[in-house]
Amino acid sequence: MDSHPVIVLVRPQLGENIGKAARAMLNFGLAEMRLVAPRDGWPNPSAGPAAAGADEVLEKAQVFDTLTEAVADCAHVYATTVRKRGMTKPVLTPEQAARDIRTSPGRSALVFGPERSGLDTGDVALARAIVTVPVNPHFGSLNLAQAVVLCAYEWSKAAGLALPDSEDHLPPAPQDELEGLIGHFEALLEPKNYFWPEIRAEVNRRTLRNVLTRPGWNHLEIRTLRGVLSFLEKEPRKRN
């Protein structure tokens, strides 16, 4: 089951905003954009620079004359709006909608209205549910890209997308590297009589091992610590 929702922009007015929406989408793993009657036509030369590298979204974007056509293959349509417009439809937060999309069979579409006015009543009437953000009641002015970011981010959380690899997420180093670090510490501490008196030596060594074992250092962290110890072994540099 493909839980990736389609992002539908209804009558978008500025190419820059379409590009920014594409950038927001791709940041969170979404790549299928559909445009309904873009004001300035399509393609729009202003969209590319604003997309900041999300060109694949723009290149594959589909254009439709009506919202009905744009969501024809979608079983679940969510209209994003800050105004409920008096309709008797479920009202969800982006987080609730993301969970719904993730677990519902069939394709889903998140629909966003034009920058100036948002979705009109007819657009919202096509939707299964309304998605609204609990913004400041005295100032509910999200721009198009911000609205797309909020919904795309919540979908990525619900989908459990993996974070990019980084040093913080490397696996713990193998035991031989850890033993090398512990041995390096002991070799530096021994001449300083750290393990003296002899009666306390075994306890002190075990305590040191426990301290160095607990963090689960990755190989880059161990390499850094070994570098620090090697530096401490050297004679102090003379200052000019």
Image (tube, rainbow, N blue to C red):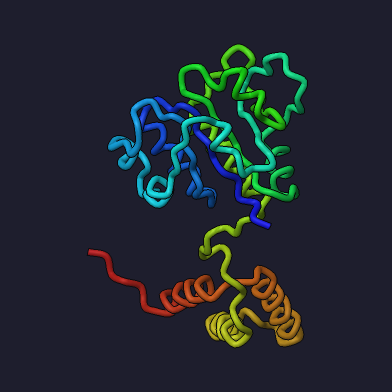
Picture quarter with the N terminus: bottom right
Residue farthest to the top, as pictured: 138
Where is residue 80, by image quadrant? top right
Picture quarter with the C terminus: bottom left
Q: Is residue 237 visible?
A: yes
Q: Nearer the viewer, residue 215 or 233?
A: 215
Residue drawn at 52 percent across, 70 percent down: 221
Residue drawn at 50 percent across, 29 percent down: 10
Q: Nearer the viewer, residue 46 or 52?
A: 46
Report the number of discs.
Answer: 0
Where residue 223 appears, as percent x and y from the top left, is 48, 76
Q: Is residue 158 above or below residue 88?
A: below
Where residue 103 appears, as percent x and y from the top left, is 75, 49
Q: Is residue 118 left or right of residue 57?
A: right
Q: Is residue 190 visible?
A: no
Residue drawn at 56 percent across, 85 percent down: 180
Residue drawn at 71 percent across, 79 percent down: 204
Q: Is residue 97 left or right of residue 139?
A: right
